[in-house]
């Protein structure tokens, strides 16, 4: 899932090492294709494509796949592709808010798969605007904790460009910023010799809710079902967990 809840890091790690690798690669490739289509293949002039490629490389996406995705997205070759972006809104177990972002070449298929996954996993679809009002677009940059990389060094690196917030997530720091400042922030980090794991514009809830372990399991099951669809690119939610609940789920 996205939105960098406390579960996001663990899910991503599992995706890289288990059977979800193929689906993860497919979504990363689609991100690259769309970025190349919208902004062209020049990395210097298309920071969205740069970040999409960096994210792919961090997840061990092969260079050949990256190059083919750029060509397809920019309209080079017979297999050039175009996707529609569609947002669906819904509620998960116990009223947890869900935003579902699809990138698809078949909106009827995407709608059917989203509705089926939601209805089978204790969720309900919602009218447009009934959920999305509590989510805002934010630049989200994830930096791994390493020797010499701490909160002070990050704050010093981005002092001149400014950020909204930095949160210690145990093994990582999660930086949030205005979307228009994200490129400047990650460039400042790079200039200071600080590597980052990912830089994305995401939908972040302004109304997070704490859930117990049972609700968290149900919400994660719903998100997993949604992410099994090739048309679902990102799932954003407002659920959050205490360290105790997180530890309980990691031990499942």
Image (cartoon, rainbow, N blue to C red):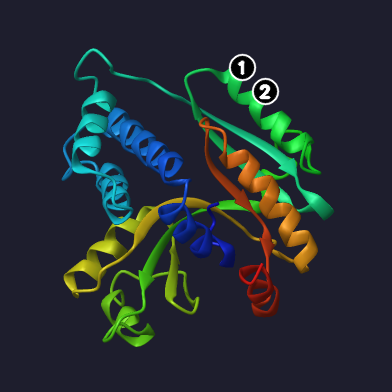
Neighbour tally class for label 1: few under 14, some 14-19, many 20 plus, Cα within 10 Å: few
Q: Quadrant of residue 3?
A: bottom right
- Give the vertical position of 173 relative to 1 (above or below): below
Count up the numbered dots: 2
* Callout 1 touching callout 2 (CB < 8 Å): yes
Query: Label 1 to label 2, Cα distance in Å?
Result: 6 Å
Closest to the observer, 191 or 216: 216
Closest to the observer, 200 or 119: 119
Q: Quadrant of residue 190?
A: bottom left
Image quarter in which the C terminus is found = bottom right
Identify the disc placed on residue 112: 2
Q: Position of residue 58 (x, y in %)?
A: 30, 56
Mark 2: which secondary structure?
A: helix
Name the residue rendered at 66%, 31% in the picture. 114
Neighbour tally class for label 2: few under 14, some 14-19, many 20 plus, Cα within 10 Å: few
Residue where numbered disc 1 is placed: 108
Give the side of residue 142 with respect to residue 94, left or right: left
Q: Is residue 211 visible?
A: no
Q: Position of residue 132 (x, y in %)?
A: 66, 44
Closest to the observer, 144 or 41: 144
Name the residue rendered at 31%, 77% in the picture. 159
Closest to the observer, 36 or 241: 241
- Give the vertical position of 150 relative to 247 (above or below): below
Give the side of residue 71 with respect to residue 16, left or right: left
């Amino acid at each position: 899932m996205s939105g960098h809840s406390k579960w996001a890091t663990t899910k991503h790690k599992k995706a890289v090492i288990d059977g979800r690798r193929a689906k993860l690669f497919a979504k990363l490739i689609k991100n690259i294709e769309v970025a190349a289509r919208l902004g062209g293949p020049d990395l210097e002039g298309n920071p969205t494509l740069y970040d999409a490629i960096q994210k792919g490389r961090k997840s061990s996406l092969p260079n050949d796949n990256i190059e083919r995705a750029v060509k397809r997205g920019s309209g080079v070759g017979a297999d050039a592709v175009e996707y529609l972006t569609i947002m669906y809104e819904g509620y998960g177990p116990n009223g947890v808010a869900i935003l579902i972002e699809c990138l698809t070449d078949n909106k009827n298929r995407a709608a059917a798969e989203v509705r089926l996954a939601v209805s089978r996993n204790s969720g309900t679809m919602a009218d447009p605007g009934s959920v999305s009002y509590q989510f805002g677009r934010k630049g989200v940059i994830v930096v791994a904790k390493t020797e010499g990389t701490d909160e002070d060094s990050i704050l010093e690196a981005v002092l001149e460009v400014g950020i909204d917030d930095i949160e210690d997530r145990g093994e990582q720091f999660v930086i949030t910023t205005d979307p228009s400042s994200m490129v400047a922030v990650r460039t400042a980090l790079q200039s200071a010799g600080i590597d980052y794991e990912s830089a994305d514009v995401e939908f972040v809830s302004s109304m997070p809710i704490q859930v117990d372990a049972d609700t968290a399991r149900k919400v994660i099951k719903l998100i997993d079902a949604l992410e099994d669809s090739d048309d679902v690119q990102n799932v954003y939610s407002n659920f959050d967990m205490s360290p105790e609940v997180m530890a309980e789920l990691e031990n499942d």
